[in-house]
Every structure is written in structure tokens, then in C-alpha cells.
Amino acid sequence: DAGVIQSPRHEVTEMGQEVTLRCKPISGHDYLFWYRQTMMRGLELLIYFNNNVPIDDSGMPEDRFSAKMPNASFSTLKIQPSEPRDSAVYFCASSLGDRGINYGYTFGSGTRLTVV
Amino acid sequence: EDKVVQSPLSLVVHEGDTVTLNCSYEVTNFRSLLWYKQEKKAPTFLFMLTSSGIEKKSGRLSSILDNKELFSILNITATQTGDSAVYLCAAVYVNAGGTSYGKLTFGQGTILTVHP
């Protein structure tokens, strides 16, 4: 099992540019979560999907952020336009049914985004 | 508003010491509490706790939940330098219908540093 795969690992972009982060969940997992981690705010849930459908996007900070899950094996988080305060590590996590509650969610290695 | 608070925020000890990390939570529709260890990359799962008073143990690590007083502790005995990491707790809750294996709300984390 390759685990949750995120790309790119690092992204440096200029303010105002569009940024797309990618995630491939573990095959067969039906829940996918996007988190953001900063020193100030810790780990924050941005959005999560169940069976490719967004369930709760209340953590998405503003309209500049959007997330899609066109199929069970791929999700994107897009920021347009990016701002320096978006600099953070973005994690994707996946789980199968209630296993996430009982055995923890599996996190990807994260994408470190720096907006200059 | 759902809230998870960890203390202390950072802790520096020497090898062989015993540490206790604290996590308190205020979460509606609480289901379980998870502990994670985060080194340089993604958080990795340690424990899931649902029932009050039942200790979970794995080697030198143990954890217990008090779901009346709404807190959990993580103990590490005979600490080693390899225990240096950020320890995160997260509350899991499901929606009122219990049909969505929903979000994690994370605490800020405790940064543990173990010196040789």
C-alpha cells in the first residue's frame, strides 16, 4: 500500500499566482480530508469528502480556496489568487468508513507551500 | 465552538524521565479521541480512546480518557531521544445522525524535546 500520496512536496510561488495541490488517497478509502498546519493555528480541517462528495467545507478560509474530488482516487485543493498568509503545510488524509475513528486517519506527507 | 486544548505547549526533558501530556476537549457529538505523533512529516497514529477509564498501552506509551471531565492524558515513561516530536490530540465527532464519520479537531500540540 503506497499510502496517501501528495504532490508537490514543496511549492514556492509568488503572491497572486494560482496554486494547485494534489492528493491520491489510499485505494478503497471513502473519506478524504484536507488539513492546513501553521505554527499559529496548528492543524485545521479545511474540507472533507465522502464518496467524492464534499460534506463539510466550513473550514475553507475564503473564496480563494476551492477543492474538488472528481473521482475516488484524486483530489485537488486550489488557491487562486495565493497570498503570503496562505503559506503553510497542507495535509491530505483518508480513511475507510469508521476506521478513521477507531484506528486513526492516514495522512500524506504534506505539501509545504510558501507564497512570497 | 468545538475546542481542543493541549498542555504544556512545549516540554524539555532528559532521557529516562517520565512525561505526562494533557488534552482537554469541548466537542459536541463527541465520538472518540485520538493521539498522534508528528515528527518531521505527517502525523502518525498512536491511540484511539472512546471509553472513560480504560487505559491504552503501547510499550512505554499509555493513554487514558476521562469523558466526564473531558480530558485525556498521554504518558511516556523512560523517555528516549527518539520520542522527541510534536504530540497531537484530536477529538472526533460525528454529525447528529451519526452517519458521517466526520471531522477531527486538533489541539495545538505539545512539542516534546528529549535530551540525551
Image: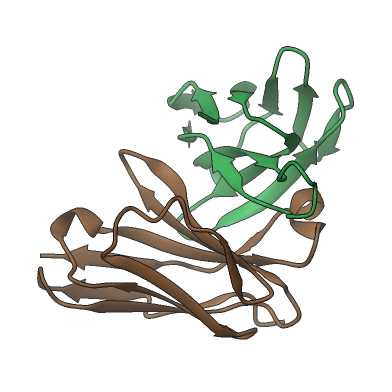
Chain colours: A brown, B green
> Residue A21: percent from the left, percent from the top?
38, 76
Q: In the drawing, does residue A73 fall left or right of residue A102?
A: left
Q: In the drawing, does residue A3 fall left or right of residue B61?
A: left
* Picture layout, residue A47 above or below residue A58: below
Q: Quadrant of the N terminus of chain A?
A: bottom right
Q: Please tell me how many numbered marks the rendered image carries.
A: 0
> Residue B58: percent from the left, percent from the top?
81, 41
Q: Quadrant of the C terminus of chain A?
A: bottom left
In the image shown, does B97 or B86 lie closer to the viewer? B97
> Residue A98: percent from the left, percent from the top?
81, 57
The picture quadrant where one finds residue A3 is: bottom right
Q: In the drawing, does residue B30 fall left or right of residue A56?
A: right
Q: Residue at x 85, y 23 (%)?
A: B52
For residue B17, say whether it is visible.
Answer: no
* Picture layout, residue B16 above or below residue A57: above
In the image shown, does A40 or B93 lie closer to the viewer? B93
Q: In the drawing, does residue A61 fall left or right of residue B104?
A: left
Q: Residue at x 57, y 30 (%)?
A: B15
Check the image and name the residue furthest to the front: B97
